[in-house]
Image: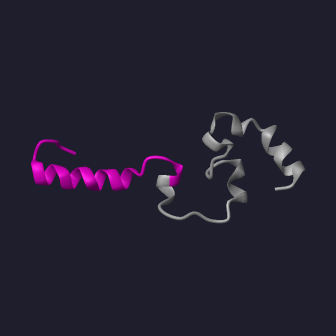
Amino acid sequence: MTEQEIWDYVTTGDPLDKAGAYGIQGVCGKFIRGIRGDYNNVVGLPIARLYQELKGFCCTYGKIRV
């Protein structure tokens, strides 16, 4: 990023509520060249994976309904 791009980004206020000061799904996403792993895990909780794990757990142990 150029110095101007950094200042432009900072003035959006976007980095103020983010760990590491950027979010791949936000304004700064255009500077991300790639990720390794599940996009949903990078952004937050991987809901589909969590659902499948809980579903398997529930079927195996029969204690929780999903």
In the rendered image, the vertical position of residue 63 relative to residue 35, given as above or below = above
On-image quarter of the N terminus = bottom right
Q: What residue appears at the point 10 percent right and 47 percent down from the top-left corner?
A: 62
The picture places residue 17, in percent across and down from the top left corner, at 64, 34
Left or right position of 47 against 5? left
Left or right position of 59 against 52? left
Residue 43, magenta (yes or no):
yes
Q: Residue furthest front?
A: 20
Residue 22, magenta (yes or no):
no
Majority secondary structure in the magenta region: helix
Left or right position of 60 against 18? left
In the rendered image, the vertical position of residue 16 relative to residue 34, given as above or below = above
The picture places residue 50, in percent across and down from the top left corner, at 33, 51
The picture places residue 43, in percent across and down from the top left corner, at 53, 50
Q: Which residues are magenta?
A: 42-66
Q: What residue appears at the point 77 percent right and 38 percent down from the top-left corner?
A: 12
The picture places residue 27, in percent across and down from the top left corner, at 71, 48
On-image quarter of the C terminus = top left
* Coloring applied to the structure: one colour
Left or right position of 8 against 37? right
Q: What residue appears at the point 41 percent right and 52 percent down from the top-left corner?
A: 46
In the rendered image, the vertical position of residue 42 relative to residue 14, given as above or below = below
Q: What residue appears at the point 67 percent right and 54 percent down from the top-left corner?
A: 29
